[in-house]
Image (cartoon, rainbow, N blue to C red):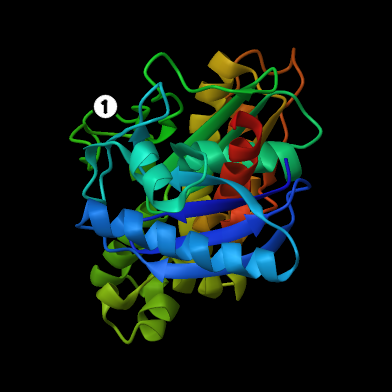
Amino acid sequence: MGICVGVDIGGTKIAASAVDGQGRVLHQARRETPAQDPDLIARAVADVTEELHRAVAADGGSVAALGAACAGFIDQAGETVVFAPNLAWRDEPLKARLEDLVGLPVVIENDANAAAWGEFRFGAARDVDDMLLLTLGTGVGGGIIVDSVLMRGAHGMAAEVGHLRVVPDGHRCGCGNKGCFEMYASGSALVREARALVAGGSPHAGTLSDRCGGDPARLTGQLVTEVAQEGDPAATELLEDVGRWTGEGAASLAAVLDPALIVVGGGVSAAGDLVLEPARNAFGRHLTGRGHREIIPIVRAELGNAAGMIGAADLAAART
């Protein structure tokens, strides 16, 4: 199949790309997400798809299908968004709604699954058959490929790795449980700890405090990363903590999955080896059977924010 549109529907923006059969992005478009109205979300997706269709047509081509990467739980049939934490989707029949609006075959998939597929097909994991993707952003997402097959589970809800329990009675997670992986290995965890350090008045946090004007609420993950890249010890330690948790969680997951490669994406991955090197060290320390098995590489994702769109477009090409 030729050109497909991949759309990544997040809580704040809808990003879309026209993608060819080699995973190359030909055109891009974007809309804000009307997060509290399912009908308006679908219409925004249809609008951005039509914009890309016109761009492809101007090049002499056509769009064959639409793939939608959704920040939510997708049912096993791939037709309904059962639940989305940041969008007004509750048992939303998104596939049928979009097909009625765009007049194209539509595939819907969880956003982390779509990103994993994109990295597997065209990114950092293109040379392996088994991989685990960890996306370190607001939370921790995941995607699993086994024997070149995207694992979706009996109910379509596999790979919710962010809710692996790593600390009994730890920080309360948005899911309602305590001690979830994403409460320690995410951008939100990084910001929480940085703000606590500054708010506590620690001299160790002097540079961070200066950069946020003494107001912890102004600290962001990007700012902490920038300060760490400049060599600040406190910011570096905060990223090391996130990396350590990432490595420990990855080791537990590897005990179950035994992937050939672990790919780390999401906003926190922009810190590069400031996060990845501590992750590798912790992974090697906690991996089951260490010393008697090959150490699984942990690498940074290659496709960046386009991974979900590229993966969704390729899944649409494969499934329609």
With respect to residue 235, does 83 lie above or below?
above
Q: Is residue 86 left or right of residue 104?
A: left
Compare residues 5 and 100 and report the one nearer the observer: 100
Whole-percent x and y of residue 178?
A: 22, 33
Res 75 visible: yes
Res 244 visible: no
Q: Amino acid at mark 1?
A: Pro
With respect to residue 290, does 306 lie above or below?
below
How many labels were placed on the picture? 1
What's the residue at 54%, 74% (across, down)?
226
* Residue, disc 1: 168
What is the secondary structure assignment of the residue under circle 1? loop
Whole-percent x and y of residue 175?
A: 23, 37
The quarter of the displayed image where residue 315 is located: top right
Compare residues 256 and 316 and report the one nearer the observer: 316
What's the residue at 26%, 80% (across, down)?
215
Whole-percent x and y of residue 145?
A: 62, 25
* Badge 1: residue crowd in 10 Å (few <14, some 14–19, many ≥20): few
Q: Is residue 64 left or right of residue 74?
A: right
Whole-percent x and y of residue 320?
A: 59, 32
Q: Quadrant of the N terminus?
A: top right
What's the residue at 24%, 70% (across, down)?
199
The quarter of the displayed image where residue 53 is located: bottom right
